[in-house]
């Protein structure tokens, strides 16, 4: 009799565990926050490779529209070049399409949201797509590290891989992965970098409180060599994977 009761208890616990596994979303959905030049793109590439995640960068999506000379591309090109922010509704338009494909996988959002209104839109968009957010990594660096990094940054025009001080391409101006040209972005000039930093402090920084209040924020010190940052990010993210 005692054995039977024990057996029933164990079976119930096992069934509940299996049920919970089905109920909880096994995918990992992240946001990377932090000023331009803290290595968000490079860190996203690392997470992408390590956790089979899709890197969703609104900056890349918008630059793609520019390269393809679409209507959106033509309208946002001058805004991107001067380091200003594109209209929320336009960014949401390109993001919505990408997220509805990416939601079947792990994903990292980089460059969105950039202001409080976009954060509220994202809440609603994720709800609509039935996706939950696991964590917001806030990567911070000092202003002189940022300016040094951005001035050295180059990006592959084709596969979008990012090169910089810590990770230069083997051959100058050529992408290691696909052999296409690497270029400096038009907005990586000192005067424009300063403007982007100002906009970040004014509009994006308040999001730290928004996500802090939701208990999602994880701080990562970006003033360190990339390898150290990678190790910390990997440790932190392991608990969200699977
Ligand atoms: P960084 O983070 O280094 O500034 P991004 O690649 O994220 O670079 O963005 C480049 C540019 O694309 C921004 O300066 C802005 O013009 C535009 N952009 C990207 N994401 C957004 C967004 N969420 N809202 C408005 N504009 C955006
Ligand atoms: Zn490439």
Image: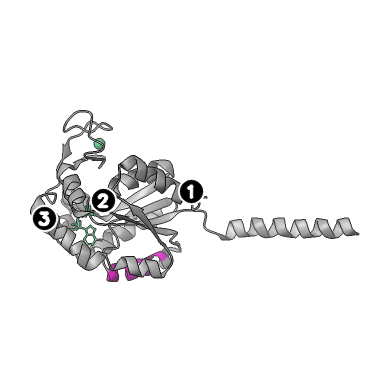
Toward the viewer: 170 or 26? 170
The residue where tag 1 is placed is: 238
In the picture, measured across the screen, residue 216 lies left or right of residue 168, that is right
Is residue 102 shown above or below 131? above
Residue 42 on image: x %, y %: 30, 44
Which of marks 3 and 2 precedes in the sequence? 2
Residue 34 on image: x %, y %: 28, 57
Q: The residue tagged with tag 1: helix, strand or loop?
A: helix
Q: Residue at x 37, y 66 (%)?
A: 211
The residue where tag 3 is placed is: 192
Within 10 angstroms of label 2, few (less than 14), some, or many (20 or more) residues? many
Instruction: Look at the magenta stretch and give its main secondary structure.
Output: helix
Distance between the alpha carbons at the discs numbered 2 and 3: 16 Å
Q: Residue at x 22, y 50 (%)?
A: 37
The residue where tag 2 is placed is: 38
Residue 220 on image: x %, y %: 35, 53
Is residue 17 shown above or below 49? below
Residue 166 on image: x %, y %: 25, 38
Tell me if I can see residue 74 in this picture: no
Residue that protrudes farthest toward the top in the picture:
171
Within 10 angstroms of label 3, few (less than 14), some, or many (20 or more) residues? some
Q: The residue tagged with tag 2: helix, strand or loop?
A: loop
Distance between the alpha carbons at the discs numbered 1 and 3: 37 Å
Tell me if I can see residue 214 in this picture: yes
**Is 88 included in the stretch rendered in magenta?**
no
Q: The residue tagged with tag 3: helix, strand or loop?
A: helix
Toward the viewer: 65 or 234? 234
Range of magenta residues: 116-126
């Amino acid at each position: 009799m005692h054995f039977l009761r024990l057996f029933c208890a164990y079976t119930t616990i096992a069934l509940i565990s299996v049920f919970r596994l089905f109920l909880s979303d096994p995918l990992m959905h992240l946001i990377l926050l932090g000023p331009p030049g803290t290595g968000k793109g490079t860190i996203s590439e690392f997470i992408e490779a390590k956790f089979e995640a899709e890197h969703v960068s609104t900056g890349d999506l918008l630059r793609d529209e520019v390269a393809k000379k679409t209507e959106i591309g033509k309208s946002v090109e001058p805004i991107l070049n001067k380091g200003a922010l594109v209209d929320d509704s336009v960014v949401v338009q390109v993001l919505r399409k990408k997220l509805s494909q990416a939601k079947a996988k792990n994903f990292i959002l980089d460059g969105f949201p950039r202001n409080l209104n976009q954060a509220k839109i994202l809440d609603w968009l994720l709800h609509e797509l039935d996706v939950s957010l696991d964590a917001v990594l806030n990567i911070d660096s000092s202003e002189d590290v940022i300016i040094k990094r951005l001035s050295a940054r180059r990006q592959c025009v084709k596969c979008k891989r990012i090169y910089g001080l810590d990770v230069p391409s083997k051959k100058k101006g050529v992408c290691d992965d696909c052999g296409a040209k690497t270029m400096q972005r038009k907005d990586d000039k000192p005067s424009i970098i300063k403007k982007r930093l100002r906009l970040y402090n004014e509009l994006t920084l308040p999001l730290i409180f928004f996500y802090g209040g939701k208990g999602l924020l994880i701080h990562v010190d970006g003033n360190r060599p990339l390898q150290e940052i990678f190790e910390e990010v990997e440790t932190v993210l392991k608990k969200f994977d699977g």
